[in-house]
Image: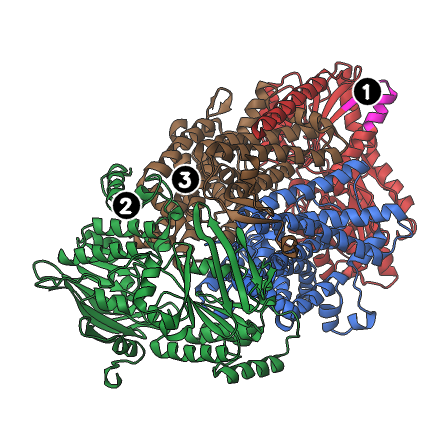
Chain colours: A brown, B green, C red, D blue
Amino acid sequence: MSAEVKTPFVRLAKRDSMDPKKVWAIRLSSILVALILGMIPIMITGQNPFTAYGIIINGSLGKPIYIKQTIKIAIPLLGCALAIAPCFKMRFWNIGAEGQITAGAIAASYFALYWSDKVPSFVLILIMFVTAAIAGGIWGLIPAFFKAKWNTNETLFTLMMNYIIIGIVSWLQGGPWEGRKGSQLIPMFNQSARLPEIFGIHCGWIIVLLLVVLMHIYMNYTKHGYEIAVIGDSENTARYAGMNVGKIMMRTMFLSGAICGVVGFIVVSGANHTLNNGVANGVGFTSITVAWLSQLNAFAMIVISLILAILTKGANTLQTRLKVPASISDIVTGILLFCMLSCEFFINYKLIFRHGKSEEEASK
Amino acid sequence: MNTSCAIEMRGITKRFGQVVANDSIDLSIKRGEILSLLGENGSGKTTLMNMLAGIYQPDEGEILQDGLPIAIRSPKDAYDHGIGMIHQHYKLVDVFTAAQNIVLGLNDQKLDLKSINAKVKAICDKYSFVIDPAMKIYDMSVSQKQTVEIVKVLYRGADILILDEPTAVLTPQETDKLFAVLHNMKADGKAVIIITHKLNEVMEISDEVAVLRKGKYIGTVKTSETDPQALTDMMVGHAVVLNIDRPKFEKPVPRLKVQGLTCIDHEGITKLDGVSFTANGGEILGVAGIAGSGQKELLESISGLYPVKEGSVSFIGGDGKAKELVGMTPMQIRKTGVGMAFVPEDRLGMGLVGSMGMTGNMMLRSWRKGKGIFLNKKSPEDLAKKIWDELEVVTPSTSFPVRRMSGGNVQKVLVGREIASQPKILMTAYPVRGLDINTSYTIYNLLTEQKMNGVAVLFVGEDLDVLLELCDRILVLCGGKVSGIVDARSATKEEIGFMMTTLGGKENA
Amino acid sequence: MKKFTVLLMVMLMTVSMVFANGTTEAAPAKSEAIKVGLICIGDENDQGYTYNFIRGQKEATEKLAAEGINVEWVTKYNIGEDSTCVDANIEVAEEDCKIIFNNSYGFEPFMLEVAPNYPNIDFVSCTNCVSSHDALPNTFNAFANIYEGRYVAGVVAGLKLNQMISEGKITADKAVIGYVGAFSFAEVISGFTSYYLGAKSVCPSVTMKVSFVGSWSDATAEADAAKALADQGCVMISQHSDNTTPATAAQSAGIFHTGYNNDMTSVAPNASLISTRIDWSVYFYEFIKAFVAGEKLDQDWCKGMEDDAVKMTELNTAIAAPGTQAKMDQVIADISSGKIQVFDTSKFTVKGATVTHAFARDTNGDFAADTDEAVFDGAYHESYFQSAPYFTEQIDGITWLNAAY
Amino acid sequence: MSAIIALIVAAVTFGTVLMFGTLGEILTEKSGNLNLGVEGIMYMGGAFGLAGAFNYEQAVGAASSSGLLAILIAIISAFAAGAIASLVYGFITITLRANQNVTGLALTIFGTGVGQFTGEFLRVREGNFVALSNHLKDSFANPIMPKFLQDIPILGKILFSHSVFFYIAVILAIAMHLFFVKTKKGMYLRAVGESPSTADAAGINITLYKYLATIIGGGISAIGGMVYIVTTAGCVWNHAGLSGVGWLAVALVIFCLWRPLNAIWGSVLFGALMIMYLRVRIPFIPTEIYKILPYVVTVIVLVFSSMRNNKEKQPPASLGANYFREER
């Protein structure tokens, strides 16, 4: 009898596999749980959470202009998530997207500011695009080089690179590129350096949607994609297979940085029309969560980045209308992440309760 | 109820997903007795013992101590019941000293070095060990680490000791010492369980033998009333011929010439020291040595994975011309058309991509092929299907992640792929570790078949009996140096065992 | 079963959202209230810049309410000087605001991106200078002659320094003022120069050290800059930055302080003598009133002490030098009457020479002033040609500790 | 000379903030948990510490508020906030075994959100700025050592002119050092971080150790955020002030080689780097470039520490990896 009592009430075992439908059901319900938990901070402010969610939906999708703004927020998130996907697939924790965006933005801005009267708009935009990609790529390459050579911790390296490049922008803002003396503002770009609009939104959305398809193909159907997947699984296996891990790491980080750079270009040329030290504005971090929540699936990223954009835009309206601080969107995003990270547990493990029945059996 | 039983396991069942690791097993051990738990690799011995040690939880069944049911929910519970286990992979903290490791997890006393050292010394004296309590683990040899493990268990007052393949990494001489200690413990009234699959050790050390086969309990016999052949029958279920078929290839030709190969690891420790030998096509060259004598480095440096400090590795082609391989990356070696296949020790961590299916793993050798940036998935898919058929790999599909397959099937995928590349040199490291006897024989046959095709096969093994029966010649490594190369048909186990510990060896053997 | 529950909940949520949505939309707006937007770079917690705007907002609302004009404000806090500013302007515009005030200098370029799309809404950029001169009739600039207030604060500081000298606490040559500036920007330069001139008008031996922190609002950097100035021998601290930390730092260093935007005596009762601030309620009031009446204010608005647009906070009489209040009142009266010209060119030199020429405005977009001679009638005329300050001379007696901004 | 002393004193003020953040993270990482959420934790600590002291003062009135009690309340509120945040992190990584990197980033987003939300919400609730009285401000920021000690030439300023939090942090660092090297529990914790399976097999309750280290570590880090708000930020909620501090604390952990005693001088050094641009001018280097110095130094340190190879100077061996006993 005593033994019976002593047996642990619940214990864990790894799950072999799970019905994909069930997997998605769990993931969807975790989003639902997150939305329910997200009501708590809203209720703390004394507001009706349903009203609040209503405003979030209305403020992000209620009018065409709101939808445009929401999409504008989603564009860099999606682009940057695409950039991060190959690194994370490779288990290279690039949290320096913020800096790579900024590096790209700097390069694009240089040409926007100083070449706008020298070349036609189309050429200018193309130059901005290419140089932004190269600059972002180089900024991503640096930590990858040290990782490849001495296995330097990339998480902190990439992070520090953010602050360094942002400092450089601050310097440009108050120094060589400053507009009115002392203003700390870089002048707005000429019309010729601005991304054209399609359907009322700058055409960055076309670029990132194109990137979605390209990234999907790259990750799943190319030799590079295969190499990245092998390295992500085991570096030793990759070496065994004759892959030059360091080189692939650097190549992938260059690519990742380059896409971030392109995002930087889209942001300065399409949205901000100027450069400032907040050009990345946290996108580099938030997009990591977009990438991870999408299980690195390029198409899922579209959905997730839209969800986060809706939250961000909606929370702004919430602040306008109900005086609920706009940071509520960060809280809900955080909760959403926690829930989605947690739900993977129920996909990978099963709980076995004391009397010998696993939850699976119990639910049957 | 038999109260003389220290521990009794009844109807223990443990599943990992679909795999039934232990199926309703009954086992008991008495005090003052050494029990051998015999079974092939993968028969569920370690899993069963891990349940006594509190690492795993049984799905079904009960455990009784001195006739009373107990629950072992954690290693701590196990210690509280006087059960201590020495795992195959030592559970030691590298940056701690021996003494720190020994007292780790004890709650009943202060961290008083003096009394710890005194108690450690008492234990060492009692069972005749030698350890330095202030030595850091990362500075210790394998057998020193094992000693620390045993002292650790004894320090906790364990009177039921479980040793998981304790001799796998020891030299015959060290093994003898260990067995002497175990005899002392037995005399001291302790119950000892040894997990092993080496029959000679079973016969030498144990009072009783319990046999597991494929997760099932077959039975327990008194050692004095049985013999190796009977035990083998119990292990494998039907009488097998222990002899491995060893045809002789008529005209072996030199294929791989290694001269003065020296490797130093990133910490500056010499791993290989002036290794020279020639491997012939049409011959299996065994590589013996205690664990960590440079086997891994040897194979990896030949295949271009490990940096070489000095020496040369040359491939001798069909035309008799030598091609220097040192300094080339694995990719360059492959591009020069040398045809080298390598089955590494760490299958999922090195030879295969665990998260991919068979097809994805077939690509590991061929992904570069073809022009353009896109992968060719067609021919790997065909190859995967071929291996699936020919080697009878058990898997639901060619995209089923290999990580989820059983050990034997994983190895079939790996060996199958390597052989499919039609190599001139085939290097294998512990290719049958963890496999059941039938799969082991499949692998032996595949290797012999390659040999008969004129391939130079390098076989790194741990079981001297297998080495002696499978190989044509055996190269013995000792501390990164070549201790000697012997003819497998005439050498004895003792001879090789001595060479493993003493350079040259022969004089005293 | 599980799936069904999930589905049910999703549907419930959706329905409730739509429902809640409907009710919000249907909620009737307050009767005849005019909706006005205010976009802020910070929030009241800065106890300085944005706080000052919020105070103006509240006061203007009360004044207008007394006249029967109900104002409903839509306020956005902590908006960045980037495309989020564009979003905030659109957001507020879509909330049916008729007037949108942008409180930060850096908002203007982004505001101007939005303004053309909402020709019926008036967009105001406080402290910047482009809106008033551009082609858009619905964009405005506004600022106040804060340099007048700083001059007065300088007088208060100078009197205190005089007192310290006469009491023997410092020698005349140790009368050093430390100034925490945000950037080496015309608005800041104009501010600390007028402050210095005010102090010098009563204490001739005074000198000044200016430390730029490189941020309009960085409490830590401001505190540390003030501490660093104190460590370098400054006995009086003033500031052109948003936080109260320089006052706190001055207090803990045992020296004196005059503030900006907000009465800081509550924060540093033993250090803070007085503060000067712009009373934005004057502008808000005038603008909204005119708008309701169907009129429009000048696109470039700038008023000073004469119109109470610039105010002094209560003098901290416990620590101010005796007679300060009387002197102050007189100086204020003289400024209002025009008797005192703050930037009287006979009172300062640049590299030893009197300033005889300086342009006020930039018209060709190269960010260098090229039009409108600011020096005439024996004075440099600040905020005369446009509301935003344009004084950028580095006058003698003021040392820039770091000029990189 | 006096400029150097002044620099050191100012560096200590900022360094104290970093020291709490770093010490907390050292404790967490010693258990093998890499909590990248320090940034968020410090935001939460700042907001809740301020809220605690503010609410206390509102409740009893500014006049009758006790400085000591306010310090205690601020510490406890900040600690509780950090502990709860880390509990969430711990639950997700230890019990639910999610990826530590991503969970840490999620905590950063969440914590920054909660911190901002709390800070802003207080303001919305009060309808005004939220600031503590001068009386409390003084008790937070003023030196606590007796006057005669502060008056010792040179050393008095360097050693005895700091706020109470500096001394708490130093005591904490020393205590943590003693805990790791002298006590059994400290040794067990290190074992958990080095090799959880070994610790597990030795009968140590690794789940408990990991949870406790993570929660207490998070609590300590959170105090750093609070110290920032009540000392350098002037006792008001500062919207952007804390950004980057938490990350710097994570970097400092590596710089300090996971040793609490190194954290004392390491954080003061980084504190100095953070404010040097205001005090020590280097010709031809623009201030904004100067400001990135601490990050450049961190990168250099990272590279050098990765190049050297010393068994004793490595991170806890299991850092970042989750443990599941029945893993095969």
Residue D181, relative to residue D88: is it above or below?
below
- Chain for mark 1? C
Which residues make up the magenta segment?
A: C60-72
Q: CA distance from mark 1 to mark 2?
A: 85 Å
| Amino acid type of the residue that numbered disc 3 sits on in the rendered structure | Ala
**Cα separation between marks 2 and 3:** 50 Å
Please provide percent x and percent y for residue A255: 39, 42
Q: Which residue is mark 2?
A: B392
Q: At 76% from the left edge and 17% from the top edge, which residue is drawn?
A: C29
SS for tag 3? helix
Q: Which mark is residue C70?
A: 1
Label at residue A133: 3
In this view, the mark in front (1 or 2): 2
Label 1 secondary element: loop
Asked if residue C206 lies left or right of residue B302, the reply is right
- Residue A201 located within the stretch drawn in magenta: no
Q: B430 above or below A82?
A: below
Q: Residues within 10 Å of mark 1 (few under 14, many from 20)?
A: some
Residue C131 shown left or right of residue D297 in the figure: right
The amino acid sitting under disc 1 is Asn
Q: Is residue B50 left or right of residue D205?
A: left
